[in-house]
Image (cartoon, helix red, strand yellow):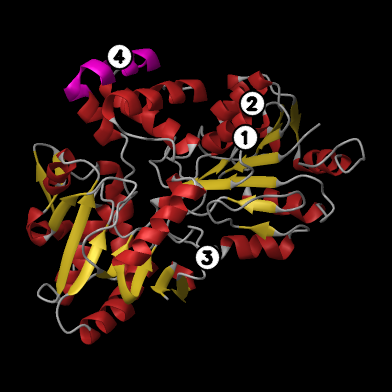
Amino acid sequence: MYRAVVIGGSAGSFQEVIKILGALSPTFPLPVFLCLHRLKNVRSGFVETMALKSGIPVIEPYSKDSFEGGKAYLAPANYHMYIGQDHCIHLSVEEPHQHSRPSIDLTFFSAIETFGKEFIAILLSGANRDGAAGIRKAAEKGALTIVQDPATAEVPVMVQAALQTTKVSHVMTVPQIIDFLLSLQEPKISAV
Amino acid sequence: MIELSLHDVQIISAALLKYRGLDMSHYLDYPLKRSYEKAMEVTGIHDADEVRHRLKHDKNYAEEFLSLIAFGSSEMFRDASFWTYLRDYIMPSLVHQVKEKVRVWFPYVASGDELYSFLIMVHEMGWNNQVETEASVPLKSMIQKVKENAFPQHKLKISMDNYHQYQGRYSLAIYLQQKEGKTFRNPTLIEKVKFSVHPFPLIEPERQYHLILFRNKMIYLNQTMQDRIVSIIHKALYPAGLLAVGVKENMGSYSLLFKPLYREENIFIKI
């Protein structure tokens, strides 16, 4: 049983995330957390563009907002995003991790504390190593880990770093990731 | 890289309460965990039990640890559009309306980034004689640290970009000076600031203020403590006083105390 999908990405991931969100429908049972590297000092435009093409609502949460299935939650610019055990999203302005704020690792780490092995961690195209440690810990915990096939990633540094670090559950192209997520709408999977 | 478990975090929090009287129970787990990890990296003590031992027996270590776990701001002029709005609309209105000095309070200063950004704005707009700025720090030792104005290199580029976006009058570089390979902010601006030691979470201050800048601090606190602090800040404001919180801080449940003045930048007016 899965309770959430957590997606990390950086350079080259934006269009891939749009494709994934565009394929989902509001009946998708799980919350989708998006931690994507973005410009620190540009607040507007990103979530609006994403929401236009998404099949589920895309929200840039306020700190302490609760979360639910069928919605995507995008880490705001220049904030780290944590998924809390109180079923709320928490933000912080602590120092960057791996030169990144938001940091994919930190979002993954919090997902591990909150969901244990009951979540799906996905890492997409990107240009630095943020996310690799998070995928490794998620795999160690027993979560389902998916890394984008480096051959199809616009910038493969991030996914290669993850694959060098750990053995993941699946290496997939984005269309395969979409097919997999759509299969989660089967009745055997329950929401949070 | 140190990675604490939440159990380790509890060990350290218990030691801070037992030996240093500091109650961390109102802080959220993840940022707290990271602040402990960072403090442990800087101090070179990598084991939670050893930290507990040092907090009990080593006063100097405890002071350093306490100052390292304070939640600072990320950079200067963070959210340039907030500072632009403050400069172009909020402050001119206050300076015009308030007959004596406009009283501004920063209830929790750790890194000094927000405070110094404000002081630069006041300086550039020629409001030095019309604005009285007070800053509270959670520990006495932090007054000197803030006044020293050491400015970490990794904040430099983004702060300069922010200042450029804010369209400051000069270059941020004129407020910075190099000394022994480190960058410091020019201390002149901070000389007039009235500092106080104010325990955090806050107690009610003795004075009232026209404007309180408290951005990105409540995000580290649980809801119960946030409610209590918002109530204290409400009392600390003059009627129709203004409160600025971080642009992603949740103020949805305080509609009886505050109404939005400018939602985009999370600026509120006391009801």
Q: Position of residue B183 (x, y in %)?
A: 16, 44
**Mark 4 to mark 3: distance in Å?**
47 Å
Name the residue carrying label 3: A44
Instruction: Check disc 3 and give the amino acid type.
Output: Ser
Question: Which residue is rendered at x = 37% and y = 66% of the image?
Answer: B234
Give the letter of the chain under mark 4. Answer: B
Kindly indicate whether the residue at mark 1 contacts the one at mark 4 (C-beta within 8 angstroms).
Answer: no
Q: Which residues are magenta?
A: B46-61
Name the residue carrying label 4: B53
Name the residue carrying label 1: A111
Please rate how many residues cluster around mark 4, counting C-alpha atoms within 10 Å: few if below 14, some from 14 to 19, many from 20: some
Question: Which residue is rendered at x = 58% and y = 20% of the image?
Answer: A165
**Left of B100 or right of it: where is B87?**
right
Give the letter of the chain under mark 2. Answer: A
Q: What is the quadrant of residue B104 in the picture?
A: bottom left
**Mark 4 to mark 2: distance in Å?**
32 Å
| Residue A97, above or below A54 | above
- Which numbered circle lies on residue A138? 2
- Which numbered circle lies on residue B20? none
Question: For the stretch drawn in magenta, what is the main secondary structure?
Answer: helix
| Residue A187, above or below B198 | above
Instruction: Check disc 2 and give the amino acid type.
Output: Ala
The residue mark sitting in front, 4 or 1, is 4
Question: Which residue is rendered at x = 30% and y = 47% of the image?
Answer: B155
Please rate how many residues cluster around mark 1, counting C-alpha atoms within 10 Å: few if below 14, some from 14 to 19, many from 20: many
Q: What is the quadrant of residue B49 in the picture?
A: top left
**Mark 2 to mark 3: distance in Å?**
31 Å
Among numbered discs 2 and 3, the one appearing first in the sequence: 3
